[in-house]
């Protein structure tokens, strides 16, 4: 025990130091202190654990799934949980629901990752440029944002998917197109307060141009609140993706997307509850996990909620 | 001298990731009908002391003391409800910046009258008259107009006068002023101090004046406590502050630039670690 | 030779009916190597003059010259190599997510230096911070240490003029003494010209040779520090400021 803990202690002290000795060291120490405050938040850790579990399930889906998610068995259709070796039962075509939910996690992660990569980046670009430049650029960019905000999210996504055609990629695109305006607004609001601060004035006095100021000085400060917001929004993205799937506009059958699975189960929900309930619970759990993690991250990252008072 | 406030071994503790941190450590002092100054640098615990007397330390912060008596009544044993009637009625506090102490969406009249009626149960008419009287007392020329105004329509100096009027309308026995003038310009400072001074004298209140400005405390107060790292390192009569003996006090005094005499270099304060471990000096009388 | 020249300088914010005149018809000169103080209360326009000079406030008229070169709408490329500024609040003037190393190396890069490594070490030594401070973030520094970093950043391009905007008003008096000593040493060593803004007359008296007193955007009096120390001002407002700064006097 002591053999293991001794270098451990050394590493801990190295990470907790107030006097870092290199750039890398300083960054690691900053990360470690953020990790420490996140770790002290039990609910956030619960959320993080669920999401790591989801990731592992998605990666090892072929090993974990007891059956082929697409294999139909019309004789064994709508088997109750536990019946015939199907732990969570089978659906209307006799496919194993557990295997489908496991493979469905891949689709969910795929959608979530793509949206998380597209929407905040677009929002950050539009918001910081609008906020820093001001004037006409700001007015034009923000009015465009307002137009997107004027429509309910799902309705707008529906319109896009209807125009682009059904499919996961188009669903991702549609969701991203409806998700970026709030990020643009947040980034713009942050930029407006940051751009008048003394440290921006100070770097202007070193002759820095707008491009450098936006990317090197404003982005790092906007990103933390965006990460929090993205994490909290992920639940909504999963639901929107499920909603599109449910309406038949997202993932196409026979793909085991959770929303599409609920849609199929809807027809038999009164007699065979498990068909819709199991993917529903999966959506619920993952959404909850993202929300818990988002709340925890807000405590760690959002400087406005800081504890120094 | 009869003591209004008697504090013994006051300690304020905050738990941190690396163990408990004592912001105030074993402070003992008394307050009579006098102007007691508390000076120290940022982080010396001077503001914490003022807040601790009113039990305004938010959890997880903890206040402990062997004694914290107001007229023999133990403040630490009071319920939160009883404490609410002490705050504002018997002990009032003026904060540094009036901007953050006044409610921006309420008219000044509503705020003053609410405080007065909460503590005395007087009628609206009586409260209005009393408020006008108080605004007059803090040298506000047009009290009727000020009563109808919102805080943002007031300048810093006016805001601070209104705060003083609000805090004194209940005729408290003790006034705690935490840097009441450091957000104000020097010319306004003098008039605000004059008002505090006059009210304290006329009404026979005890004043705790918390400040970082040694010259100001020396010229304004009767008695001074000098705090360092949560402790009292020295206590003396205010007019004798410039003859203080503790090396920390001396260091502070010598580090000040002076108008009357040119110095080639300012003396840098060399901190002795022993100062922060030495026991707190008692300022009980 | 005059390093800084201001003549009929007007600075305003807003337009038309919202226009606020922050500086009205100000004029003074600062000789090369001198230290000049601007004192006044908040809102008197003293900081605005500095901000107008470095181009942070574009709405001004009149003449501003640095080393004889009149300033136009935009600052020429080399301007910031000559003129640098230290801001009032060291808690606001350092980027909260940038380490000392990042702050200084970015500044040096922007000014086109190559030997960044050596210069960072030298700058930290110049402002009295050891190499141990190099990779710290602002939240790991005290107020005085932050202000030293801000001074190091201002010194990085090797300027000849340093504009000091209340450089110690956010600091405790003992730290103020250290920073003022540092500024005095640097001026002597690097032959800097200082233009210092402060509301604290004692600080200005300690640092400067000449002082301009401002009230409501106007310079009411320019005097030498000797005249100020003798408590012998010409203008009643200066007299009032001087008296108020000496501490509390009943019935004042």
Image (spheres, rainbow, N blue to C red):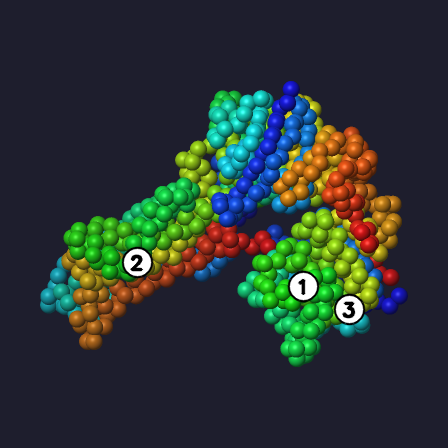
Q: Residues within 10 Å of mark 1 (few under 14, many from 20)?
A: few
The numbered dot on residue B173 is 3
Residue C225 position in % (x across, y down): 76, 32
Which residue is under mark 1?
B142
The numbered dot on residue B36 is none
Residue B30 location, quadrant: bottom right
Is residue B226 left or right of A52 when viewed as pictured? Answer: right
Q: Are marks 3 and 1 on the same chain?
A: yes
Residue A117 position in % (x across, y down): 32, 46
Residue at (49% x, 44% y) in the render: C15
Q: Quadrant of the C terminus of chain B?
A: bottom right
The residue marked by circle 1 belongs to what chain?
B
Residue at (79% x, 59% y) in the render: B197
Q: Assign a secondary structure to mark 2.
A: loop
Residue at (20% x, 65% y) in the render: A263
Above or below, C43 relative to B95 = above
Residue A200 position in % (x across, y down): 50, 39
């Amino acid at each position: 025990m002591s053999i293991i803990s001794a270098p451990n202690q050394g590493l801990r002290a190295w990470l907790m130091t107030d006097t870092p000795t290199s750039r890398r060291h300083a960054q690691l120490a900053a990360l470690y202190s953020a990790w420490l405050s996140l770790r002290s938040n039990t609910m956030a850790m619960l959320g993080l654990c669920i999401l790591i579990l989801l990731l592992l399930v998605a990666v090892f889906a072929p090993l974990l799934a007891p059956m082929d998610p697409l294999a139909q068995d019309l004789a064994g259709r709508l088997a109750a949980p536990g019946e015939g070796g199907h732990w969570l039962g089978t659906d209307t075509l006799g496919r194993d629901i557990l295997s489908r939910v496991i493979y469905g996690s891949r689709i969910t992660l795929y959608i979530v990752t793509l949206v998380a990569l597209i929407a905040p980046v677009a929002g950050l670009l539009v918001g910081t440029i609008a906020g820093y430049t001001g004037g006409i650029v700001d007015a034009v960019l923000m009015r465009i944002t307002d137009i997107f905000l004027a429509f309910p999210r799902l309705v707008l996504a529906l319109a896009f998917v209807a125009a682009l055609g059904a499919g996961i990629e188009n669903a991702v695109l549609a969701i991203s197109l409806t998700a970026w305006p709030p990020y643009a607004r947040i980034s713009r609001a942050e930029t407006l307060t940051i751009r008048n601060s003394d440290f921006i004035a100070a770097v202007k006095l070193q002759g820095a141009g707008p491009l450098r100021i936006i990317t090197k000085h404003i982005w790092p400060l906007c990103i933390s609140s965006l990460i929090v917001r993205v994490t909290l929004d992920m639940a909504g993205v999963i639901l929107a993706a499920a909603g599109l799937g449910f309406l038949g506009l997202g993932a196409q059958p026979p793909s085991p997307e959770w929303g599409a699975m609920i849609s199929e189960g809807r027809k038999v929900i009164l007699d065979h509850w498990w068909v819709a309930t199991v993917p529903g619970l999966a959506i619920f759990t993952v959404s909850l996990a993202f929300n818990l993690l988002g709340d925890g991250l807000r405590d760690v990252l959002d400087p406005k909620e800081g504890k120094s008072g | 001298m009869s003591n209004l406030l008697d504090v013994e071994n006051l300690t304020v503790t905050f738990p941190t990731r690396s163990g408990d941190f004592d912001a105030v450590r074993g402070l003992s002092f008394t307050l009579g009908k006098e102007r007691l100054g508390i000076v120290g640098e940022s982080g010396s615990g001077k503001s914490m002391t003022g807040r601790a007397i009113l039990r305004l330390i938010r959890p997880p912060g903890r206040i402990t003391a062997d004694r914290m008596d107001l007229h023999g009544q133990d403040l630490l044993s009071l319920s939160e409800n009883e404490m609410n009637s002490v705050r504002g009625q018997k002990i009032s506090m003026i904060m540094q910046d009036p901007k953050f102490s006044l409610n921006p969406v309420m008219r000044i009249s509503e705020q003053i009258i609410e405080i007065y009626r909460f503590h005395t149960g007087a009628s609206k008419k009586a409260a209005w008259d009393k408020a006008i009287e108080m605004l007059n007392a803090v040298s506000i020329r047009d009290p009727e107009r000020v009563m109808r105004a919102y805080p943002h329509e007031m300048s810093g100096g006016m805001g601070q006068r209104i705060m003083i009027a609000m805090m004194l309308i209940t005729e408290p026995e003790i006034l705690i002023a935490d840097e009441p003038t450091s957000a104000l310009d020097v010319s306004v400072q003098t008039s605000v101090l004059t008002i505090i001074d006059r009210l304290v004298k006329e009404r026979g209140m005890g004043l705790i004046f918390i400040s970082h400005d040694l010259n100001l405390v020396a010229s304004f107060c009767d008695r001074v406590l000098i705090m360092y790292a949560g402790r009292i390192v020295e206590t003396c009569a205010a007019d004798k502050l410039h003859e203080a003996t503790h090396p920390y006090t001396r260091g502070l005094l010598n580090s000040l630039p002076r108008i009357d005499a040119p110095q080639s270099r300012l003396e840098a304060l060399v901190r002795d670690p022993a100062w922060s471990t030495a026991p707190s000096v008692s300022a009980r009388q | 030779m005059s390093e800084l020249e201001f003549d009929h300088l007007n600075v305003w914010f807003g337009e038309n009916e919202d226009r606020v005149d922050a500086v009205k018809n100000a004029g003074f000169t600062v000789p090369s190597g001198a230290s000049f103080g601007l004192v006044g209360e908040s809102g008197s326009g003293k900081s605005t003059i500095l901000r107008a000079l470095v181009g942070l406030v574009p709405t001004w008229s009149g003449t501003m010259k640095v080393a004889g070169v009149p300033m136009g709408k935009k600052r020429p490329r080399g301007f910031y190599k000559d003129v640098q500024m230290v801001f009032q609040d060291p808690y606001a003037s350092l980027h909260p997510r940038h380490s000392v190393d990042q702050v200084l190396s970015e500044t040096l890069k922007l000014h086109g230096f190559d030997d960044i490594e050596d210069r960072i070490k030298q700058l930290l030594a110049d402002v009295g911070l050891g190499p141990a401070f190099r990779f710290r973030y602002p939240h790991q520094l005290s107020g005085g240490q932050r202000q030293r970093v801000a001074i190091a950043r201002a010194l990085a391009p090797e300027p000849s003029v340093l504009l000091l905007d209340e450089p110690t008003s956010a600091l405790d008096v003992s730290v103020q003494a250290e920073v003022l000593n540092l500024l005095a040493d640097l001026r002597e060593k690097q032959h800097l010209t200082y233009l210092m803004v402060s509301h604290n007359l004692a600080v200005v008296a300690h640092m400067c040779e000449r002082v301009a007193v401002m009230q409501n955007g106007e310079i009411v009096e320019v005097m030498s520090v000797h005249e100020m120390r003798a408590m012998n001002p010409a203008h009643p407002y200066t007299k009032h400021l001087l008296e108020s700064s000496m501490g509390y006097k009943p019935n004042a």
